[in-house]
Amino acid sequence: MTQSPTLSRRASSAAPQPRTSRRRGADARAGYTFLLPWLLGFIALTVGPMISSLYLSFTNYNLFDAPKWIGLDNYTTLLQDERFLQSVGVTLQYVVFGTPLKLAAALAIAMLLNSKRKGQGFYRSAFYAPSLIGASVSIAIVWKAMFGDSGPVDQGLSFFGINLGGWVGNPNMTMGMMILLTVWQFGAPMVIFLAGLKQIPADLYEAASMDGAGPVRKFINITWPMLSPVIFFNLLMETIHAFQIFASAYIISNGEGGPAGSTLFYTLYLYLRGFSDFRMGYASAMAWLLVIAVGIITLIFFKTSKSWVHYSGDSK
Amino acid sequence: MATPTQSTPAATQAPVYNPKSESVTAKRIKSAIFHIVALALVVMVLYPAIWMIASSFKPNSEIGGANNALWSANFSFDNFATAMDGIGGVSTLTFFTNSLILAVGAVVGTVLSASVSAYAFARINFPGRGLFFGMMIATLLLPFHVVIIPQYIVFQQLGLVDTYVPLLIGKFLAADAFFVFLMVQFMRGLPAELDEAARIDGAGHARIFGSIMLPLMKPALISTSIFSFIWSWNDFLGPLLYLNTPEKYPLPLALRLFVDQTQSSDYGAMIAMSVLALLPVLVFFLVFQRYIVEGVSTQGLKG
């Protein structure tokens, strides 16, 4: 930049301070003007509702009569509600088994694809496609048909002499079917892993090869630590996401969470309590317990991340 | 390996030529194995989609049951004809239109509100920016279910249940923090000199945003449009909560109604309708593949 603009500016305004403070004021005004849509949404659609659902969680409210304060009753009732405890169990089972399996599949396929071979773009897109449609009602219907009595899965397994019958009606198999549905959508974390793998400098692997390290050693000593920030990101997002599964569970169980409550996911039970039974205070208490659980899990993830997540450089 | 008895030209040629050709064939074999494995995995992963499309052309009796051939000899469009008839006197075309209205509304609202809000976060210095930015990030992790009950109560009291207002208002208020975040990240990558030069020329924030930022943000705007379209198109919980009249249903809700009413008796039509409901998403994917996959890999967007 040349000197003249600064000179002329200084010449035109005798005192530079009012000018900068005026600019600061203008910036503040512009800042809040531009932020207005988000700010309105944040207050009206997030903060406000959060506070009122916290209040409702201490009341009895059925949408028609005025909310009645009942203190901690909703929370204590929840702890004795067998359906609630079942929904917690179902959801935890899904998160604890589904998420690691999904991420393992994502990482394995990403490592397979991470080479300079032709067709990588095609494979990447093909594996990603299920992530885009997997949570839709259409796929839930297809899943239900595929895992139904004498559906293709049943027939395929019968061919190998495994006669399980349909998975949809069998309470012992529905969880497997739901986990397969989430694992099927491994493409989104895979694409993110692939981007992370590309950032790992090739000379690290070359140096390790010279030292005689095999693929396992290379994975443990190079890939895992170098990729750990991406693994952490995927693990956190997928876990939080898994807690909130709804549409697939609703469709596969006809909105009932059956058979025998085996697909009564947390959000499905919350929906049934709030919008079928109109026990909105009770459902609000459930919603807040979910927020607290997700908050604690996020906190644990961040706390433990220090011991296994390595950020290259000290910039962040 | 060259033996010491060999003449010099052969000796020089052999070590250069042989290992090279060996490694070329080894590479080819490796590459062939890679493609065989990868293709087998692709077929496996895409099998549910293939099965869905194949079944939609089959007569009912051949989906499941003893006849388990993927392609049927009795190929027909009958299922699609049934599916297009719709449910309860409402044509499937109506459901399509409803889905389209909601998705286009979501795209317009999200692009407008997210880009403006992102500009404030990325380019304007104002008190409280850091705090609000942190809160915006926190909403990324917040389970959506904590707000649905109070939101429903308010919309119910305002008489807005069974309208599209509850489904669209959030889009116009940048409630999908993912998109705000995506755009902030993108804008931070644009050189700050652009703004400063424009400021020296006397341009205000409105001018800088409209004439400089927006045109440069095209890739981010395109990813946002694609994803907000697809998410709205697939959304089930929102319409399930707020819409009661079948005439207003978007496709996912219509599909549920269809499943409820036919009670698995007409699998063919059900699957055909599922295919129809996914068709726009699949077309989007084929056309915008690169944008979609790049968007995921750089912004960590979920599917």
Image (cartoon, coloured by chain):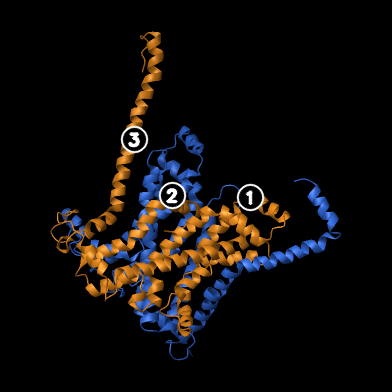
Chain colours: A blue, B orange
Q: Amino acid at mark 2?
A: Arg
The dot on residue B30 is: 3
Q: CA distance from mark 2 to mark 3?
A: 27 Å
- Per the image, the residue denoted by label 2 is B290
Vertical comparison of A211 with B137: above or below? above
Disc on the earlier residue, 2 or 3: 3
Residue sitting nearer the eye, B91 or A275: B91
Of circles 2 and 3, the one toward us is 2
Q: Position of residue A85 (x, y in %)?
A: 37, 75
Residue nearest the observer in this picture, A83 or A56: A56
Residues at discs 2 and 3 in contact (Cβ within 8 Å): no
Q: Position of residue A191 (x, y in %)?
A: 43, 51
Mark 3 or mark 1, whichever is nearer to me: 1
Q: Residue at x 51, y 83 (%)?
A: A55
Q: Which residue, given by chain and number where applicable, does mark 1 sit on?
A: B191
Helix, strand, or loop for circle 1? loop
Q: Is residue B1 left or right of residue B200?
A: left
